[in-house]
């Protein structure tokens, strides 16, 4: 959770992940990390913590939803057909690892509130499940992940108390946690996501292959679990961007 990044417990391996709900490579990266953990013999001793990042910080809560193809076209000053073709390539890459993207359904909105829901879920030990549902809601279901009622429904789907989730979003109870994550990302020079930090020491940037995640898991597990390990000033990058 916010304020805890890069701290490493001695009895488990902590993986800190910066991502955004509307980032297609973050959904892929999370899936590839899951696939790596399925092959990792010490997976039960790994804790994954999610941290907020805003891919489009210029979007505000009051903005009307925009299709992702159109947003890409405007943001990068591309012809709409070129933007669609680029997203089609991303869709195919996602399909190869078992994900079902539908950019034609997407509603690009500010994800600040969705990140608040992630932090709420973390207090109930359901952050990973909640993040997976948020990714699917955005990329597959085409839901508005800025709408409090939609988010409360998603919280209920993963076993959280709907009324408590809605109250937390309405009050902005976890807004400071999101802000702290964003500030930590700035301090550590994280400018793109997904960004994974293993044991506070080794970083993997981008949606890397499963083998890259397995190597990071093996190395960080062998070097840190069971031995004293404090926070470090910044992680050493062990893999380049995988986009």
Image (tube, rainbow, N blue to C red):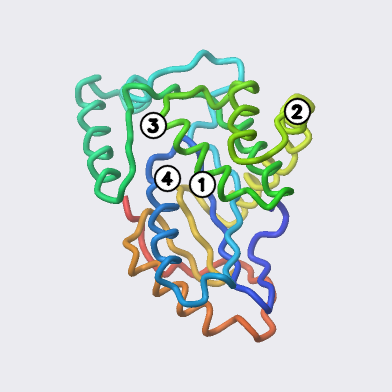
**C-alpha distance separating marks 3 and 2:** 25 Å
Label 3 or label 1, whichever comes before in sequence order: 1
Residue under pointer 3: 140
Q: Closer to the camera: disc 1 or disc 4?
A: 4
Q: Closer to the camera: disc 1 or disc 2?
A: 2
Residue under pointer 4: 27
Residue under pointer 1: 19
Q: Closer to the camera: disc 4 or disc 2?
A: 2
Secondary element at tag 2: helix
**C-alpha distance separating marks 1 and 4:** 8 Å
Left or right position of 134 against 230: left
Question: In the image, what residue occupies the spot 68% across and 67% down?
Answer: 7
Q: Position of residue 164 (x, y in %)?
A: 77, 32
Residue under pointer 2: 163
Secondary element at tag 4: helix
Label 4 or label 2, whichever comes before in sequence order: 4
Task: Tell me the crowding category of disc 4: few under 14, some 14 to 19, or many 20 or more residues within 10 angstroms, Cα based.
Answer: many
- Label 1–label 2 contact, CB within 8 A: no
**C-alpha distance separating marks 3 and 1:** 17 Å
Secondary element at tag 3: loop
The answer to whether 143 is drawn above or below residue 27 in the figure is above
- Label 1–label 4 contact, CB within 8 A: no
**C-alpha distance separating marks 4 and 2:** 27 Å
Label 1 or label 4, whichever comes before in sequence order: 1
Label 1 or label 2, whichever comes before in sequence order: 1
Secondary element at tag 1: strand
Label 3 or label 4, whichever comes before in sequence order: 4
The one nearer the camera, 148 or 69, is: 148
Q: Position of residue 56 (x, y in %)?
A: 49, 32
Per the rendering, the mark at residue 174 is: none
Question: In the image, what residue occupies the spot 44% across and 73% down?
Answer: 40
């Amino acid at each position: 959770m916010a304020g805890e990044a890069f701290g490493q417990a001695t009895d488990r391996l902590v993986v800190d992940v910066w991502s955004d709900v509307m980032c297609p490579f973050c959904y892929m990266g999370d899936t590839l990390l899951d696939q790596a953990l399925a092959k990792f013999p010490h997976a039960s001793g790994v804790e994954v913590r999610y941290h907020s990042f805003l891919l489009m910080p210029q979007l505000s809560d009051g903005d009307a939803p925009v299709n992702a193809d159109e947003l890409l076209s405007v943001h990068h000053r591309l012809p709409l057909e070129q933007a669609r073709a680029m997203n089609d390539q991303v869709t195919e890459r996602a399909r190869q690892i078992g994900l079902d993207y539908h950019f034609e359904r997407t509603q690009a909105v500010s994800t600040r509130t969705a990140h608040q829901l992630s932090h709420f879920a973390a207090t109930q030990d359901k952050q990973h499940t909640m993040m997976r549902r948020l990714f699917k809601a955005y990329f597959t279901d085409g839901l508005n992940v800025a709408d409090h009622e939609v988010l409360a429904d998603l919280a209920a789907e993963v076993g959280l108390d709907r009324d408590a989730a809605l109250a937390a979003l309405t009050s902005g109870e976890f807004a400071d946690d999101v802000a702290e994550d964003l500030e930590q990302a700035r301090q550590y020079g994280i400018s793109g996501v997904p960004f994974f930090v293993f044991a506070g020491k080794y970083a993997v940037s981008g949606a890397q292959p499963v083998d890259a995640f397995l190597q990071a898991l093996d190395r960080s597990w062998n070097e840190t679990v069971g031995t004293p390990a404090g926070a470090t000033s910044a992680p050493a990058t062990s893999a380049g961007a995988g986009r």
